[in-house]
Amino acid sequence: ATLSPDDILGLDSVFEEDDLEFASIVKKWLDENVRDKIGDYFLDATIPARELAEGLGELGLLGMHLDGYGCGGSTATQYGLACRELEAVDSGLRSLVSVQGSLAMFAIHHFGSEAQKEEWLPKMAAGKAIGCFGLTEPDVGSDPSGMKTTAKKDGSDWILNGAKMWITNSPVSDVMVVWAKTEETDSKGKPVVRGFVVPSDTEGVQTPEIHRKISLRASITGEIVLDNVRLPEDAMLPEAKGLKGPLSCLSEARYGIVFGVTGAARDALQSALDYTGTRIQFDRPLSSFQISQQKLAKAFGQYSQITLLAAHLGKLKDSENGVRPEQISLGKMVNVDTAMNVCRDLRALFGGSGITSEYPPLRHAVNLETVLTYEGTHEVHQLTLGRSLTGINAFAN
Ligand code: FAD
C-alpha cells in the first residue's frame, strides 16, 4: 500500500481539521478553475489576473487574514494553508494573492485612514480592484533607504516623481501603494519615507510591462513611472512613517511565502510519485529503482522539514506573542531554498518530459528563483539571521 506524503508526515495532527478542510476547498476550486491552464499561462507569460481575482475574492482569499472591510479575519495558519494550495499550482498565482492581501491591502489596512480603508479594502477583498506595491526601483532593491522617488508638497497637494521597478501586477492594477521620500527629515537629517495610495489612472502614471522573464511567467510584472503625479493631501497613508512601514508589509508577505513554497515542493513530489509509478524502463516502473527511491525519500524528508517549520511559524504568528521578523527570515531563507532544491532534484526523474510544461517540477523550480530574490533576497535573510546570531550588522557600514 502507498501513503501520500502528508499521511506519512501525519499532517492531520499538525494542523486543525477545520484548517485542512478549508485548504481542501481552496484546492478543489483551483483544480476546477486553474490547474489545467497554468502550464499555458506560464508559456504565454501571462495570467488572467482580473478574472482570477474575482474568483479568488469570492473564495475569500484576498486579504483573508485581515479584519473588517469585507476581509475574512482568518488565522495566520489558515492564510498560510491557502498560500500553500495556491503555490502548489504556481508561484505566480500565490504572488497575485500575496501582493493583493499582504502588501497592498495590508498597507492600507494597517496604515491607512478610515476613508482610504473604506474606499479600497471592500473592492480589493472582492477582487473587483487589483492592488500593487511599489518599493523597489531601478537603482534600489535590497537597500530601499536609497530610494529616489520623491513626494513634494505643492500647496496641500503632493507631487510624486520617480520610477518603481519589478512591481507585481502594476500593469493590471487599479490602485498602487507607492513609497517615496518626502521633504520632511528625521532626527538624523534623512528624508522621511511615506506611503501613498495612488489610483492607477491618475494623470502622469504609466505602468509598462516587463517582458522576457524566464521565471514567474504566470504573473504580470511591470514598472511604475511617476511623472509629476499630483495627489490630494489625503492620499498619504497617515500611520506609516519611515521605512518601518513598507518593511512590516514585506514581513507579512514573507510569511505567506514560507507556507506557499511547501505547496510547490508538495506538487513536485506528488507528480514525481505519480510519474515514476507509471513510467516503465527496463521492464520496471522507475519508482522501483533504488536511485529513484533515494531521490523521492530525500525530497520527502526536505518537504516534511519545511512543512513543519511553516506550521511552527504559523502557530507563533497566531499566538499572543506573535512571530518576530528574524523568525520569518529563517522561514523564508530555509523554505525557499529547500523547496527549490526539491523541485530541481525531482525534475530529473521525468527525463526529457521533465523539461516541458506538461509536468510541474521545472516550472516550480524556475519560479522559485524569483521567490528566492523578492521579499528580501536569500542573502539579505542570511545577513538578518547572521545579525541576530552574532549581534553584528554585516549589511552595511
Ligand atoms: P540587488 O539589491 O541589486 O541585489 C543583487 C544581489 O546582491 C543579490 O544577490 C543580493 O542578495 C546581493 N546583495 C545586495 N546587498 C547585499 C549585501 N549587503 N550583502 C550581500 N549581498 C548583497 N518589488 C516591489 O517593490 N514590489 C513588487 O511587487 C515586486 N515584485 C517582484 C516580482 C518579480 C518577478 C521580481 C523578480 C522582483 C520583484 N520585486 C518587487 C523586487 C524585488 O523585491 C527585488 O528584486 C529584490 O529586493 C532585490 O533587489 P534587486 O533586484 O535590486 O537586487
Image: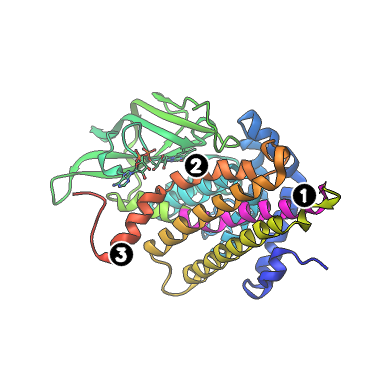
Q: Which residue is mark 1?
A: 275
Tell me, for residue 370, which label it has, or none.
2
Residue 70 seen: no
Residue at the image point whose x is 59% and y is 47% from the top: 344
Q: Disc 3 residue type? A: Ser
Residue found farthest to the front:
282
Residues at marks 1 and 3, CA–CA distance in whole angstroms: 43 Å
* View quadrant of ligand 1: top left
Real-space CA distance between mark 2 and mark 3, rounded to the nearest whole angstrom = 25 Å
Report helix, strand or loop for mark 2.
Answer: helix
The amino acid on which the numbered mark 2 sits, given as a three-letter code, is Thr
Specify start and end residues of the magenta stretch as a single range: 254-280
Q: Residue at x 32, y 29 (%)?
A: 162
Give yes or no for contact between labels 2 and 3 (Cβ–Cβ under 8 Å): no
Callout 1: SS: helix
Q: Which residue is mark 3?
A: 388
Q: CA distance from mark 2 to mark 1?
A: 26 Å
Asked if residue 261 is among those painted magenta in the image, a careful observer would answer: yes
x 27%, y 34%: residue: 148
Which sits in the foreground, 209 or 100? Answer: 209
Determine whether the beta carbon of the residue marked 3 sits less than 8 angstroms from the nearest atom of ligand 1. no
Q: Position of residue 49 (x, y in %)?
A: 61, 37
Residue 44 coordinates in the image, percent (x, y): 65, 28
Give the percent coordinates (x, y) of residue 189: 13, 45
Taking depth in this image into account, of 129 and 178 the one nearest to the observer is 178
Can residue 275 be seen here? The reply is yes
Question: Disc 2 beta carbon < 8 A from ligand 1?
Answer: yes
Amino acid carrying mark 1 in the image: Tyr
Nearer mark to the viewer, of 2 and 1: 1
